[in-house]
Image (tube, coloured by chain):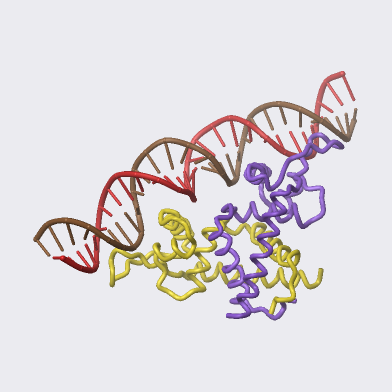
Chain colours: A purple, B yellow, C brown, D red
Amino acid sequence: MMTDMNEIQALDLWRRTVVSSVRLAAPDLTARQMALLLNVYLTPPPHTVRGMAEKLRVSKPAITRAIDRLSSLEFVRRKVDENDRRSVLIQRTVRGSVFLREFGELILSAGHALQDA
Amino acid sequence: MMTDMNEIQALDLWRRTVVSSVRLAAPDLTARQMALLLNVYLTPPPHTVRGMAEKLRVSKPAITRAIDRLSSLEFVRRKVDENDRRSVLIQRTVRGSVFLREFGELILSAGHALQDA
DNA sequence: CGAGATAATTTCGCTAGCGTAACTAATTTT
DNA sequence: AAAATTAGTTACGCTAGCGAAATTATCTCG
């Protein structure tokens, strides 16, 4: 699919996408926040604080704070796990889906622009 | 090159790359900082604060701060423009090149992993 | 030369994020 | 049922980042 891409092209794809996102005044997420958000939407649940901390190799408080931020944007929401009420399940939201759908479109557009360039 | 990618694949490429970067404990840059860094390395100089503010549609102080952060990481450096000493030229560094080369490799690896998946 | 324009930074008051350690609540173990 | 473990959050002291407005330094043009 994209095996025929070199390093410069890969970075330029990244550049075009991030620049578009910044120009559109999308929320200025950190790499950690983006990693958390994408995992919630693209990998199978359940998603817990502990699990995310291990997957990303960051501390649990860092995950709590990332969820705080993404929750305030309404990109994810917390739900107590009824099977084990110590756990918190990180869940998707409509707003988060919309954000990622649009972000995905930015990547594809960047890919097409790269073709033309 | 990557015209045959759909939205989910594009997002998953992004996810795998960002997760790798976070796991490797790379600096937790914001989207704005990453956009600035990539522009400095992938688009033709000169790169000024004013120019970057316009290209990214953010305020000049926001660019100044992003340069502060990237400078402290030694990913870019400031140099006064000798032709117009009011201007600051944002320049590349060895450390920044290394960081982006490695980041580019992460994107390509993510692309290959995506193939296999 | 002097007035105005321009480029970048600094300041202000404020919010967000950091890691470590302490804490709360829920569950499991014995 | 008491002790130990587990999950997540909160507290602490600190650094980073925000936009708007003020400030500094430099340049341009009348």
| Closest to the observer, A17 or C22 | A17
* Residue at image coords 82%, 50%: A45
| Closest to the observer, B8 or B15 | B8
* Residue at image coords 45%, 65%: B76
Q: Is residue B58 left or right of residue A109?
A: left
Q: Is residue B18 left or right of residue B8?
A: left
Residue B10 lies, with reference to residue A5, above or below; the image says above
**x and y percent of residue B24 in the render?**
65, 60
**x and y percent of residue B47 in the render?**
42, 69
**x and y percent of residue B95 in the render?**
50, 67
Residue B16 lies, with reference to residue A53, above or below; the image says below
Q: Is residue D9 left or right of residue B52?
A: right
**x and y percent of residue B96 in the render?**
51, 67
The count of marks equals: 0
Residue C16 lies, with reference to residue A8, above or below; the image says above
Q: Which quadrant of the figure contains the C terminus of chain B?
A: bottom right
Residue B78 lies, with reference to residue C13, above or below; the image says below
* Residue at image coords 67%, 78%: A5
Q: Which quadrant of the figure contains the N terminus of chain B?
A: bottom right
* Residue at image coords 45%, 54%: B62
